[in-house]
Amino acid sequence: MVRSYNLADLLEIMTAAAPARPALVAGAERRTYAQLNERADRVGRHLAQAGVRPGEHVAILAHNRAEWIEAMFGAFKIRAVPIPVNYRYVAAELRHVLADSDSVALIGERSLLAKTEEVRAELPKLRHVVVLEDGAEAEIPGAVPYERALAEADLSEGFPERSNDDRYIMYTGGTTGYPKGVEWRCEDIFFGALGGGNVFGDSIGSPEELAANADQPATAVLNCAPVMHGAGQWVAFMGLFSGAKVVLYTDHAFDADKALRLVAEEQANVLMLVGDVMARPVADALATGQYEVPSLIGIASGGAPLTDGVKRTLRDHLPNIMFLDNYGASETGACGPSVDGADGTARFMMDADVTVLDDDLNVVPPGEIGRLARSGHIPVGYYNDPEKTASTFFTAADGTRWSIPGDFAIRQEDGTIVLLGRGSLVINTGGEKVYPEEVEVALKDHPDVVDAVVVGLPDDRFGQRVAAVVAARPGAAVTLEELTGHCRGRLAGYKLPRQLKLVDEVQRTAVGKSDYKWARSVLA
């Protein structure tokens, strides 16, 4: 069989090379490469027997667990497209992602599927549901239990020949409302975000070359990031394709003490965190002197950067630790590692195909502000959204195709790139991206709210917190508690405002747009 960069092919290559090698640990569940591959086979065959066809979309709605990884590989086995779904979404957000993605099947935890039942009637394309047990008792009519599905799967029939063009989709927040699906070819995501088969060196030249990673010394990665997000997902697959044992942190709330115990128990070499919100508690726990973690070589962060202050604190206890921050976005993939800079400055040594462009797609001179751009292995576009695709992906006069998601940056003389902000407005709170317009729309839907502007303010724990400036109708006296209660039914908890300032009138720019600079000054 001709091998491709479809992720299922890559798992099979690693399995053939090292079937007994440890692959995945998630709580009490442990899988070798052979066991992970066999269970993914069963997921794929079950989906095919349920009528899922190549190119159709299979949503995954769960916290970190072994079955999450099995389900994603299982969809790729039959050339279907897995759709990771944020487990924090409320029913309205779930309805949008499941409908917008045209998902025909859904694999999810029972407690989370209960939220989809609220909008099931509005999802006519969703025709098959598989339930993962999580201790909840909610009734999910017509759902098939996951373990029964795997046990009854018919493995007598093989799988279709896969392709480099098979799709990989992840949903990311949109600046004008609900999340958008970023659509990649499997070959492009492998080289653009999954390490290309060699995280610290030259990429492999063919899928078959991946097998050489089975001869590398055994390593282990403790992944505390949610795998439904790009950063956590990419680290998990980079680990598996490099021959490492991937350990998923499975508790629903992060506990630094438990994470450090897992590092010691599993002899983890790399600890994957999400910014300061996880790194600060880890530093505090290390300061107690209770933990010895001699196996730990590197600390990685995705979804949010580690500040220089936190890095210094961690180095007080782990003087030889390497930091493996890497700039990345759903529309660009992983672009390059961070380098030390001034406090509060995000500076990265970007890959050769990453630069900073002006509005005419010309590279800006060093020291000038432009927009971060990547060429080469980039997405096809946004699924089901040609207008958004046209505003993010551009082709220059010389034929070079660029992904320009809107991050403003400065190119330095030494080749590094300093980031100035994701679209200059996006709020990063504990690794979750919050787009102000979505929160503003929800606030303005309250009957007593006339106008609103939402910004991010510095926060010691989460990096940023969501703050709102609101003008209420005359005579009304809205409160923060009232507004968050109103928004809770349509926004995930991390998007809710944590700070409120009431004003008589919301100031706008000359062209009627939200004046974010003014809003920050009012809140300050």
Image (cartoon, grey):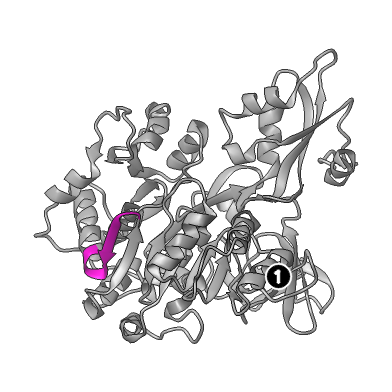
Quadrant for the N terminus in the image:
bottom left
Residue 232 locus on image (x, y percent): 49, 60
Residue 359 in which image quadrant: bottom right
Q: Is residue 183 left or right of residue 212?
A: right
Q: Residue at x 58, y 66 (%)?
A: 332
Q: How many marks?
A: 1
Residue with the mark numbered 1: 312
- Residue 136: give x, y in percent of width and height: 34, 33
Q: Is residue 409 left or right of residue 246?
A: right
| Three-letter code for the amino acid on which mark 1 is drawn | Arg
- Residue 352 or 53: which is nearer the viewer? 352
Magenta residue check for 30: yes
Q: Secondary structure at mark 1?
A: helix
Judge whether 261 appears above or below 486 on screen. below
Q: How far across and how far down the image is residue 223, in percent?
A: 46, 62
The C terminus lies in quadrant: top right
Asked if residue 354 lies in the magenta stretch, the reply is no
Q: Which residues are magenta?
A: 27-35
Q: Is residue 474 above or below residue 493?
A: above
Q: Is residue 452 visible?
A: yes
Q: Residue furthest top?
A: 475
10 Å crowding of disc 1: few (<14), some (14-19), many (20+): few
- For the question of whether residue 333 can be seen, the reply is no
472 over 467 or under it: above or below: above
**Residue found at the far left of this picture:** 156
- Left or right of residue 256: residue 361: right
Q: Position of residue 132 (x, y in %)?
A: 30, 42
User: Looking at the image, which residue is at 74% across and 59% down?
Assistant: 421
Which residue lies most toward the front here? 289
